[in-house]
Image (spheres, helix red, strand yellow):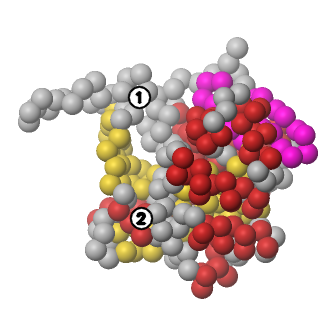
């Protein structure tokens, strides 16, 4: 089966509840409005959203050998995602997170690292994962076995085979920077949040952050900036600040993953860069209106309609 996109990296089960005002004392109970389970993570959230946007997707990651893994694989298959390259690792739990969504949008998390620490991409899998024209690596920073030299080999080989490489990370810190910086010459679209970009570069202004990553080899940067919109810069001199859409925000979990999915879909459809940014922002905006990393996104056509009709923030 030929795929439009291969999504490699961090796959997590998210268990989300809102609104969480407090954690009850002792063995008490509080009542909340909503609880959801979602396939999440910087790869998992992206692959579900990109499948909802109509792309034929191959998921490449790891889950444990438990009931959480069963649910995640079933859910991805329901969305038409090819899970044949997902690894089930015996003796470890599926990576999972409990997210307590505050009324103000804060989301303190409790996380089990689990299977993502044991995930790698053997060279014998390359022919399978490189059958798609686009490869997305998501989750550098929480991929203990894949981070570093194995990721560098993966992306170098992807570019050698003419693939378009998109990239996002998680848990940005000095250690993550050591893993990310060597990858930049092999990345076409580097798509962190502005907070992550600042942490990695030590700079503050989006244009300065972008110049730093471009100088270190990235072809283009697209930063998500929440209510401040998105910023794009490429090595051809293009600079775009795209304002945010005016949406009622319920939960920002997975908005970055949805932005990645929107950019990937836009690349697939060969949209110009300004339209690509707007489409990616519409995908992220839809996710922000509900609970969890796949909330709000229905289809490519619906996302395109929202992009064309939503008002931007003044």
Q: Which residue is mark 1?
A: 106
- Along the line of sight, the residue nearer the viewer: 36 or 125: 125
The reply to whether the C-beta atoms of the residues labelled 1 and 2 are less than 8 Å apart is no
Q: Residue furthest top?
A: 314
In the figure, is residue 88 to the left or right of 58? left
Total number of numbered labels? 2
Q: Which residue is mark 2?
A: 117
- Along the line of sight, the residue nearer the viewer: 154 or 74: 154
Please give the name of the residue rendered at 36% of the width and 57% of the height, measured from the top-left corner: 113
Badge 1: few (under 14), some or many (20 or more) residues near its Cα, within 10 Å? some
Please give the name of the residue rendered at 42% of the width and 64% of the height, measured from the top-left corner: 117
Determine whether 45 is above or below 62 in the image.
above
Nearer-N-terminus badge (1/2): 1
- The x, y position of residue 299, in whole percent, is 63, 48
Q: Quadrant of residue 101?
A: top left
Q: Residue furthest bottom?
A: 124
Bounds of the magenta segment? 222-242
Q: Is residue 7 magenta?
A: no
In the figure, is residue 112 to the left or right of 142? left
- The x, y position of residue 235, in whole percent, is 86, 46
Q: Is residue 49 visible?
A: no
Q: Is residue 224 magenta?
A: yes
Please give the name of the residue rendered at 90% of the width and 40% of the height, measured from the top-left corner: 237
Q: Is residue 39 visible?
A: yes
Q: Quadrant of residue 212?
A: top right
- The x, y position of residue 287, in whole percent, is 54, 38
């Amino acid at each position: 089966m030929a795929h439009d996109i291969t999504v490699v990296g961090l796959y997590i089960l998210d268990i989300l509840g809102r609104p969480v005002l407090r954690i009850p004392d002792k063995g008490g109970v509080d009542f909340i409005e909503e609880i959801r389970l979602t396939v999440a993570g910087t790869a998992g959230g992206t692959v579900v959203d990109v499948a909802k946007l109509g792309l034929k997707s191959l998921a490449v990651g790891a889950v444990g050998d438990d009931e959480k893994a069963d649910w995640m694989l079933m859910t991805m298959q329901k969305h038409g995602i090819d899970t044949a390259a997902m690894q089930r690792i015996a003796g470890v739990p599926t990576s999972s997170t409990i997210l307590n969504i505050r009324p103000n949008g804060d989301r303190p998390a409790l996380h089990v690292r689990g299977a993502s620490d044991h995930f790698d991409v053997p060279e014998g899998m390359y022919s399978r994962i490189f059958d798609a024209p686009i490869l997305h690596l998501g989750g550098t920073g929480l991929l203990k076995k894949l981070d570093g030299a194995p990721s560098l080999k993966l992306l170098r080989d992807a570019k050698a085979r003419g693939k378009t490489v998109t990239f996002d990370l998680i848990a940005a810190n000095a250690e993550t920077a050591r893993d990310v910086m060597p990858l930049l010459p092999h990345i076409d679209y580097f798509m962190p949040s502005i907070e992550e970009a600042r942490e990695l570069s030590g700079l503050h202004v989006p244009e300065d952050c972008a110049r730093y990553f471009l100088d270190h080899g990235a072809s283009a940067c697209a930063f998500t900036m929440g209510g401040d919109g998105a910023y794009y810069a490429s090595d051809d001199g293009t600079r775009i600040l795209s304002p945010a859409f005016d949406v009622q925000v319920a939960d920002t979990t997975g908005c970055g993953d949805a932005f990645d999915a929107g950019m990937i879909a836009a690349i697939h459809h060969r949209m110009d860069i300004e339209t690509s940014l707007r489409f990616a922002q519409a995908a992220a905006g839809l996710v922000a209106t509900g609970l969890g990393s796949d909330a709000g996104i229905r289809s490519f056509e619906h996302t395109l309609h929202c992009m064309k009709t939503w008002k931007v923030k003044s």
